[in-house]
């Protein structure tokens, strides 16, 4: 049904002519057309207006030719739907004026009807699917419960999310109650996304690497596992944990279709730690897109040869940076498409 199904085949572990390629956070950011829209509409207006979300989602497909689209939205629409106020302050990033700091605060957090609160996301998915015209698959996503909790408790971005960790270690019961509420909401949300038409889902655990291996299992992984269990029969699930190489063994036995890897873990180590059978996705250092297109091409070839062409999705190791020249992003995508077996 989908004309370019390289990405879906790689997620199934099938043999492919070349690895598929997309870039985390590819929708917008570094694209001049996105900057123009950004001047006119604030962030959550862009997320809440299906026409705008659709336009931004298809931009990288038309302009740099990635093999999959990722819906323009944000992981923080989930806490918003749970009645936690979230603003996006230009130049600052996420800003939550009333962070969760006590068991009482957790009690007041709502597990919403996602159809009602996040219907605009489903409308954006339907509109995007129709605009994509089955050319490439559409990825839906959510933040991991731990990563969402980081923002909900800290109240803003942070280098170490110390307040979120403090909450976990001082009030573990309340922390787990909050994580479970976020998990229940996320499962309902992703199931709706699947119904609306996404072809795969990715869980972003951007701040999983803040936790020790033992704490990671307790405060992050067990909740991601619940999400995978609930979704895996319906759609391929990709689990991306930034800085979570230590958990790759456990993750590889979870039922996820693929695991995201960042650039601090070599392809060889990632294959070894994940047992060699599961599809891996990554792991080009996003800052390496500042290198020249020629160097990018060389490094992309080395990366593909190290991961191997099969059971592999070429990607960055984290989101693309806003100030990357478009021609360098293009060089990255082209290099994957032009890769030849040795
Ligand atoms: O490819 C895409 O861009 C798809 C949509 C997407 C956005 N955010 C749009 C966005 C996705 C997949 C995300 C995920 C997201 N959001 C994560 C997980 C991935 C990661 O990068 O770690 C996180 C932690 C967030 C929270 C968030 N949203 C932050 C920290 C910020 C501000 C800083 C930044 O990275 O720009 C945002 C804002 C945001 N989300 C922007 C975009 C395009 C930039 C703000 C704007 O355009 O006005």
Image (spheres, rainbow, N blue to C red):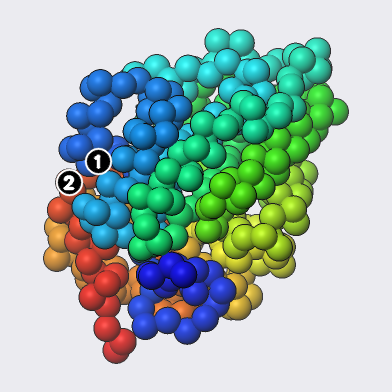
Q: Residue furthest top?
A: 97
| Residue appearing at x 46%, y 39% in the figure | 124
Give the residue at x 43% y 24%. Answer: 44
Mark carried by residue 325 = 2
Residue 151 at least partly seen: yes
Q: Is residue 247 above or below residue 320?
A: below
Identify the image quadrant of residue 308: bottom left
Instruction: Please name the residue shown 40% across and 61% down the image.
Output: 134
Q: Is mark 1 within 8 Å of ligand 1?
A: no
Q: With 291 as the anchor, is 146 left or right in this view?
A: right
Task: Give the side of residue 304 with respect to residue 87, left or right.
Answer: left
Q: Name the foreground residue: 133 vs 14.
A: 133
- Per the model, the C-alpha gap separating discs 2 and 1 is 7 Å
Question: Seen from this angle, which residue lies furthest bottom?
Answer: 342
The residue where tag 1 is placed is 30
- x and y, in percent, of residue 256 in the image: 65, 62
Q: Nearer the viewer, residue 102 or 53?
A: 53
Q: Which element is circle 2 on? A: loop
Point out the tag, 2 or 1, that comes first from the N-terminus. 1
């Amino acid at each position: 049904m989908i004309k370019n199904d390289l990405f879906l085949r790689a997620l199934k572990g099938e043999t492919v002519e070349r690895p598929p390629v997309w870039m985390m956070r590819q929708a917008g950011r570094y694209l001049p057309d996105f900057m123009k829209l950004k001047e006119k509409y604030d962030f959550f207006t862009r997320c809440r207006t299906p026409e705008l979300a659709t336009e931004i989602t298809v931009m990288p497909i038309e302009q740099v030719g990635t093999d999959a689209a990722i819906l323009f939205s944000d992981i923080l629409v989930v806490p918003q739907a749970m009645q936690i106020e979230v603003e996006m302050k230009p130049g600052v990033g996420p800003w939550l004026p009333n962070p969760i700091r006590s068991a009482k605060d957790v009690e007041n957090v709502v597990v919403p009807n996602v159809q009602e609160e996040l219907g605009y996301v489903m409308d954006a998915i339907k509109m995007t699917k129709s605009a994509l015209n089955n050319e490439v698959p559409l990825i839906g996503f959510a933040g991991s419960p731990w990563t969402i909790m980081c923002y909900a408790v800290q109240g803003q971005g942070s280098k170490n999310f110390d307040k979120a960790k403090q909450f976990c270690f001082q009030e573990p019961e309340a922390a787990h109650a909050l994580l479970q509420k976020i998990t229940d909401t996320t499962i309902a949300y992703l199931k709706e996304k699947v119904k609306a038409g996404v072809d795969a889902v990715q869980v972003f655990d951007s701040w999983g690497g803040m936790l020790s291996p033992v704490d990671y299992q307790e405060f992050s992984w067990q909740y991601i596992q619940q999400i995978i269990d609930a979704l895996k029969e319906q759609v391929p699930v990709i689990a991306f944990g930034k800085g979570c190489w230590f958990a790759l063994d456990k993750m590889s036995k979870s039922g996820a279709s693929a695991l995201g890897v960042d650039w601090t873990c070599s392809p060889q180590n990632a294959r070894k730690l994940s047992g060699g059978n599961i599809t891996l996705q990554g792991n080009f250092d996003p800052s390496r897109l500042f290198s020249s297109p020629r160097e990018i091409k060389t490094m992309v070839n080395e990366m593909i040869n190290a991961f191997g062409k099969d059971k592999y999705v070429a990607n960055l190791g984290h989101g693309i940076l806003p100030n990357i020249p478009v021609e360098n992003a293009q060089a990255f995508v082209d290099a994957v498409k032009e890769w030849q077996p040795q």
